[in-house]
Image (tube, grey):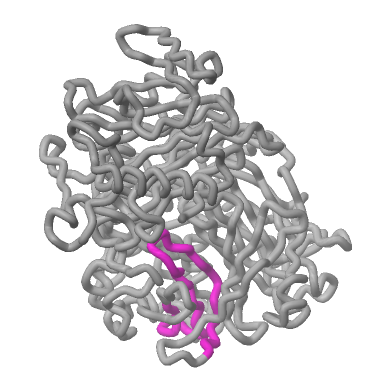
Amino acid sequence: MLNIDLHPDLTLVVSEVRDGTMKAAAPGANGDDAQTWAEARRNRRALLRQAGLDPERAAYVRISYDRSDFCEYREVDEATADGAGDERDATRHETISARFADDAPIACDALATGLPGTPLLLPVADCMPVVAYDPEHEVVALTHLGRHSVEQLGGQRTVEWMQRRFRSDPAQLVVWLGPSPNGQSYPLHALGDRSFAEVVPQQLRDAGVKRRHIVASGIDTVSDARFFSHSEFLAGRQPVDGRYAVAVALHGRSASGSIEAGQSGQAGQLGRSGQAADGASEVSQPPAAEPHRVTTVVADGLVEEGVIRAGECTALSGLSADPAHPGLLYAVNDDSVGLTRVFTLDATKTPVEAVAALTVTQADGSPAHLDVEGVFARPQGGFWLADEGATGPGNAVHRVDAEGRIRATVRLPEAVSRHMGKWGFEGVTAFTDPRGQEWLFVVIQRPLWKAPAAKPREVGVDGPDVIRIGCLRVDAALGGTCGAGDDADGVGDDGGVSDERGSSDAAWSWHGYGLDPASDRKNDWVGVSEISVAMVTGEGGFADDLGCRVTLVLAERDKQEGDRARTKRIYAVDLEHPGQVTTDSAGSLVPITVPVTKRLVADLLPWLREPGGQVQEKLEGVTVDARGRLFALTDNAGDSHAPCATVFVDLGVRDFG
């Protein structure tokens, strides 16, 4: 059984093959035999009990194809909780009783309820189960989106029904997309041979659901043996024509409240950035807004268990959100503390607690000693790590599996790396488009030099105060599809790929980013130290399409601390069709003369203070979680006045558009 952390108000679970089949129709005409029915009934009840839910209060979604309308929805209502069977609308049967129905007498495509402790249960195989939660009105819906229903715009009509029935605001809905088959094995012919994973999110967005509030499981029922698949049974590759089940129940309002874009710190009117005549950055300031929390990061539990030594959870140089679990984050350390580790952070606690540490190893199992400056948690499992080299050619992005083993490496084309000194990769992020193609983004901390070894260095490729954001299609760099082809432990079939596979053969797309000016103090400079995808918008969602827009957030900082610090900011930029190649990776480097426009999201200068009151130099981590919540942290290594304090800032839900 899988537990899904969609919202604090909900219990949401998904059964697996090992939990038994959940398929059953009552014995009789067109029903199952008595033994199969009884077995499925036991399995469903056992699943609910294991999840801490009461089987006697559950309502069961029964799907029937003996009808023409596949968008019929019903509410499980308090008025009928005694089984009276009141029907508010005789033509739609929109209300049913809140009681356990082992074979519901009336077929429907979705159930919704506002009754705490009343589970909704849906058995399903190759169709997509979808959970939609309205935190404002405390109503949860469980809907079945099969081929028939999506052809009738079932995703959109589910949201519209919730609007009519419960006055739900689509922009506030939080939606989970369950397992479904891939488009090659189960194409939706009437919808351009696309997959459920492509069609359903678009229908939800057309109804007004925000992209960042849609959480996809990313599970393919055809290739993932943990789940029943009707098509795999028909093909003779599964012995049982079973159904797994999704169950969801509301357990009341949590202290967290509802999700609201811009809650306690909306970015407000975000201005356009350019370079004034004196070199100053012209950026309109958003209204001042305090973060939800400013705290520290501790690892007391790991020290007690002997996983790390006291003080080792320091020098955290990169931050990434778990793709499916809001409030669960991952951080990495740089080379100043020895072994390279990925720390799991529980950001729901104060102070933030490091609850696990994963040691990164080479493919042969030996410990890896890397200078990791960025991390991205992949929905497919494992991580991307940005490794900053001592020189340009030493910069690399490593893909590691869920056990921490390096499985593939991407390096820069020589046309770019020869212009880099010791300031290289400082962040990595990615997203996977509806076709299953993974797009990688990296950021280079400082401008490209004409000759990095020269003294003094001369900026000459893109001009002063312009750094680069790179975009690369992963399968073009590594060969094959390492986006969707990873197995359950995060290891793909390209596990033996060498460094060279991802170097000069792959074509990068490059985008310029204009830095704020540095002060006139000796050795001061400004650079970018982190990058994270905030949202992807536009038709299709393919990075090489003209209509695609990827919104990134970046951490920008100067090399000053204490009272001298001036730049500790988070900016947002929009990259239009970022996957279109703009450079000849194997030849001459095309200069970037016009940087992208940036918008100020937050000035963290007032908040990056360790307990002693000094502003730390290194704003090194920024990420956006599955609910649009923005987090930031510092790398405290080298701050003699704060050897143990990592400052963590929770900036709340932000609107990055």
Task: Specify the quadrant of the image occupied by residue 106.
Answer: top left
Residue closest to the far right: 612
Q: Considering depth in this image, is 651 or 480 the residue closer to the camera?
A: 480
Asked if residue 159 lies left or right of residue 638, the reply is left
Question: Magenta segment range?
Answer: 367-396
Using the rendered image of the protein, determine whether residue 282 is visible from the camera's viewpoint. Answer: no
The residue depicted at 18 percent of the width and 31 percent of the height is: 29
Residue 633: percent from left, percent from top: 67, 60
Q: Is residue 559 above or below residue 30?
A: below
Residue 601: percent from left, percent from top: 59, 44
Answer whether residue 389 is magenta in the image: yes
Asked if residue 451 lies left or right of residue 654, the reply is left
The residue depicted at 30 percent of the width and 8 percent of the height is: 91
Using the rendered image of the protein, determine whether residue 633 is visible from the camera's viewpoint. Answer: yes
Residue 623: percent from left, percent from top: 56, 55
Number of numbered discs on residues: 0
Q: Is residue 567 above or below residue 548?
A: below
Q: Considering depth in this image, is 232 or 154 the residue closer to the camera?
A: 232
Q: Considering depth in this image, is 627 or 654 the residue closer to the camera?
A: 627
Asked if residue 114 lies left or right of residue 542, the reply is right
Q: Is residue 144 above or below residue 389?
A: above
The residue depicted at 15 percent of the width and 36 percent of the height is: 191
The residue depicted at 34 percent of the width and 42 percent of the height is: 123
Q: Is residue 12 above or below residue 174?
A: below
Answer whether residue 516 is magenta in the image: no
Task: Specify the quadrant of the image occupied by residue 411.
Answer: bottom left
Task: Specify the quadrant of the image occupied by residue 103.
Answer: top left
Residue 364: percent from left, percent from top: 42, 92
